Image: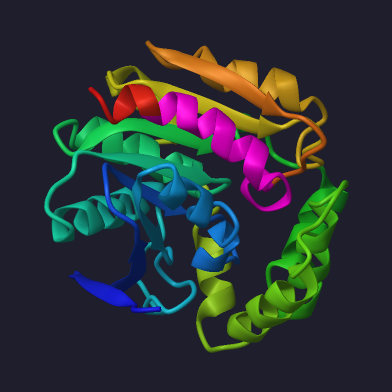
Amino acid sequence: MTVSFVGRDGGRIAYEVHGQGPLVVVSHGMGENRGSFRHLVPLLVEAGYRVASVDVRGHGESSAGWPSYAPAEVGADLLAVVRDLGGGPATLVGSSSSAAGVVFAAADAPDLVAGIVQVGAFVGRGKPKPAMRLAQFAVLRSPRLFGMFHRSLFPGPRPADDVAYRKAMVAKLREPGRMAATRGVIAPVEPHWTARTRAVRQPVLVLMGAKDPDFPDPGAEARAARRLFATAEARMIADSGHYPHADQPAATAAVLGEFLAVTAGA
């Protein structure tokens, strides 16, 4: 495995590339790292794509201690990776918190982005209940508690290497600045990604696990996200939680393959 880095104002972004073909850039959610896509990347490579898996700022092997972790900055980081790899255009896949970043990237640089995929995107902007705020406060300051929370997002099958991946993830979160980054990527900030959706003219796929425990009604959340875009479709992955690329990689790759056939040929 060869890790590459691209410099940004405030640090550097780590990524690794596999395969040949049209470029796909994947980015993980809060607290995770590029290993989140370890089961999906080989399937996309086998299907004929060049896949760049990114460590979001403050996570994985990317620098810690950034002045901002706003989605707009995450989107700009993804565009920097695309430029570092020749300028694309690329299809951007953002999971959970990164689903906001890909919207900013598509709106800000349409020449570099062929399409975007939002996996487990959060549309709602309401404040959580006091009990939930207290739980979030604890989880987002403790690597151990975050690991327990992360496990809960797999209500069905989990990858065979799930325990080893989570152990390594928690160890990484114990490094200085990593939990601050975890909090930073989901901190409220304006503009919210939903304010930029009408500026996205590229094809959009909203992908959601049918059993995603982060949402009372995952299907309704997916449909709400789809309606925000000029051109979008929503697809559900059966028997999947918040990370369909991890717990149902084959089904996820099949759905992505249909979408990539369109964006790669655009």
Q: Position of residue 39 (x, y in %)?
A: 60, 57
Quarter placement of the N terminus: bottom left
Q: Nearer the viewer, residue 68 or 211?
A: 211
In the picture provided, is 24 more to the left or to the right than 258? Answer: left
Magenta stretch: residue 39 in it?
no
Q: Residue at x 48, y 48 (%)?
A: 98
In the picture provided, is 109 more to the left or to the right than 17? Answer: left
In the picture provided, is 104 more to the left or to the right than 9? Answer: right
Q: Nearer the viewer, residue 228 or 88?
A: 88
Residue 67 appears in the figure: no
- Give residue 250's quadrant in the image: top right
Q: Position of residue 110 (x, y in %)?
A: 19, 31
> What are the residue bounds of the magenta stretch?
243-260
In the picture provided, is 8 more to the left or to the right than 245? Answer: left
The answer to whether 155 is drawn above or below residue 111 in the figure is below
Q: Residue at x 67, y 53 (%)?
A: 246
Q: Residue at x 59, y 65 (%)?
A: 32
Q: Position of residue 55 (x, y in %)?
A: 43, 67
**Could you tell me what secondary structure mostly forms the magenta stretch?**
helix
Residue 102 appears in the figure: yes
Quarter placement of the C terminus: top left
